[in-house]
Amino acid sequence: MKLRSLDFLLIVALLLIPQLAGAEGYRTTVGEGADEIPLLVVTGTPYEMGFAVGSLLKEETQKILGGFLQLSKMGDAERFSDEVLDAAWDSVSPHTHDDFKEELRGIAAGSGLDHQDVIRAHMVPVVADYACSGVAFWGDRVSNGHLLQIRNLDYETRAGLQDHPAVVIYIPDDGIPHVCPTFAGCAGANTGMNYEGIALTEIGDTPASDWPFDLNGVHFTSLFRDILTNAKEFDTAVGMIKDAPRIKKYHYVVGSGDEQKAVKMKAHAPDLEIWGESDPTDELAPKIITDGVYHCEGRDPLAWKHIPAHSPYTAESMVDLSRTVATKGGNLLNVVFDATARELWVAYAEKDENAYLRPYVHIKMSDYIPYAPKEDAVKLSKATN
């Protein structure tokens, strides 16, 4: 009987080892001083990449996800209760790709957090409301002809997400490498760009007065990860949003750096409206432009004034536009993408100082793809157990 028990334990160990042995990645930094940002490069299956993220940012993930849940409950104990968050997961889970679920499981295992708590933390944005800005320019409106795109995440700083920033470059075994400026332990993409030049921006339109929300669909953060992993072409990315069962009210900007085009989408579930450049049916008409689309949640007059003064745009003037249309007093994260060159500039809030006041840190995806661990980086060994 003793021998059989040992045999059983050995079999269990052997079954578990392959699940962890493929997890690989490393942690380095970009930027300097107060603007130094952890950058992770992870590779493998969805579970393995999640495990790598949870392991490489273990302390930060434990602090941010637990703190995020606690602060949300302090703000609105009923709306962010475990029961409501669990019900939100029950609603969106059937529409959520299995890869995303596996990554959440990996983050929990790598960080040592309870799996259900990781899920609940990822449901906070599903039941929350917030506002943002998105802009895409290309062609003659950009000095070098590239596609430049903005994503401002206008969200309060009281939750402390900015204390644990993370830029994650995913190199999946099956899928397209992509980059997500995000926060420790967060699997969802609030924005991102893949190595095929597809860039994604979200603008939240859902007011608190709409609560309780109909959540029978997919949340954009998991949908964005699905698009970034699988969409090689502009039409595919747009089609995935069209085909998705949508929830709440959002605007999206989808751009392609190689195909030199972008659209703005008004996704007020279940309806969907799509506008390209110079579209007279655009909700902002007649203030529409060639080689560009924009939506800045009430700050559109600021963008409209900025555009003729700065066209053709450079990366530097796009950063200036990002700062101009940011929500003053509630600006957590700003990103400017060059989707043609596969480069980005990222600014996070620092304590109570909003992101638009901070330096924008430059990142080139080609510095990290293909996957090759750096000698001076904090690595995750394949032998992790």
Image (cartoon, rainbow, N blue to C red):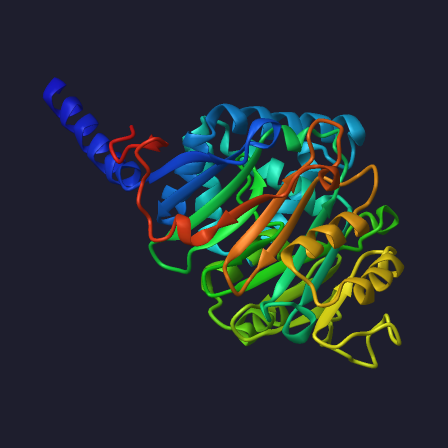
The part of the image, by quadrant, that contains residue 125 is top right
Q: Can residue 217 be seen here?
A: no
Residue 382 position in % (x across, y down): 26, 36
Q: Is residue 289 left or right of residue 108?
A: right
The part of the image, by quadrant, that contains residue 192 is bottom right
The quadrant of the picture occupied by the C terminus is: top left
The quadrant of the picture occupied by the N terminus is: top left
- Residue ID at (83%, 81%): 280
Compare residues 17 and 86 and report the one nearer the observer.
Answer: 17
Compare residues 266 and 354 and report the one nearer the observer.
Answer: 354
Q: Is residue 137 left or right of residue 189?
A: right
- Residue ID at (64%, 70%): 138
**Residue at the extreme top of the image, as rendered:** 2
Residue 11 position in % (x across, y down): 18, 33
Q: Can residue 117 be seen here?
A: yes
Residue 267 position in % (x across, y down): 73, 65
Residue 7 position in % (x across, y down): 14, 27
**Residue at the extreme bottom of the image, as rendered:** 280
